[in-house]
């Protein structure tokens, strides 16, 4: 029995291989679901975090968000789709229209890899 994937990764790279701008897009997107603590410090949601993967800014979205707040989960995936961002979803079977391989494999129609990826 396999364990379900922890989450999906929205990469700051478009399907055509260009870097997504502005450079702080991941922090801004995660800020939409953040709160402020008693110490007046912003706290990212435990389900949505900005990360840096192979030099590319990304947003990691835990799959639990889908059950907890489906509209927020849909918003994040719609954002990625509307901006033609690469989404790595280990839960999608290879060969499906929405499957994206892990970095280092061809990503888009041109078969380009994400910048900074090492095979």
Image (cartoon, grey):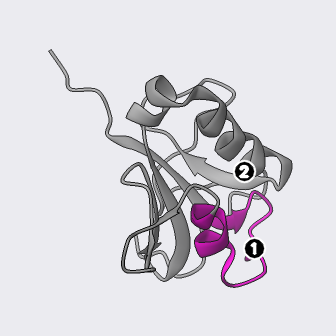
Label 2 element class = helix
Q: Is residue 58 above or below residue 68?
A: below
Taking the spot 76% from the left edge, 41% from the top edge, the residue there is 78
- For the N terminus, the quadrant is top left
Chain part drawn in magenta? 12-31
Residue marked by disc 1: 20
Question: x, y percentage for residue 37?
Answer: 40, 69
Residue marked by disc 2: 80
Q: Residue furthest front?
A: 38
| Residue 30 highlighted magenta (yes or no) | yes
Within 10 angstroms of label 1, few (less than 14), some, or many (20 or more) residues? Answer: some
Residue 97 placement: quadrant: top right
Question: From this viewpoint, is residue 113 visible?
Answer: no
First in sequence: mark 1 or mark 2? 1
Taking the spot 32% from the left edge, 35% from the top edge, the residue there is 5
| Residue 61 highlighted magenta (yes or no) | no
Total residue callouts: 2
């Amino acid at each position: 029995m396999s364990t379900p994937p922890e989450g999906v990764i929205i990469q700051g790279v478009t399907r055509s291989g260009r870097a997504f701008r502005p450079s702080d897009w991941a922090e801004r997107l995660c800020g939409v679901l953040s709160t402020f603590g008693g110490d007046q410090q912003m706290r990212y949601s435990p389900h949505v975090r900005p990360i840096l993967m192979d030099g590319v800014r990304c947003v990691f979205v835990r799959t639990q968000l889908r059950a907890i707040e489906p509209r927020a989960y849909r918003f994040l995936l719609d954002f990625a789709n509307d901006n033609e961002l690469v989404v790595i979803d280990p839960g999608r079977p290879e060969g499906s229209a929405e499957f994206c391989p892990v970095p280092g494999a061809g990503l888009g129609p041109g078969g380009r890899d994400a910048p900074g990826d090492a095979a």
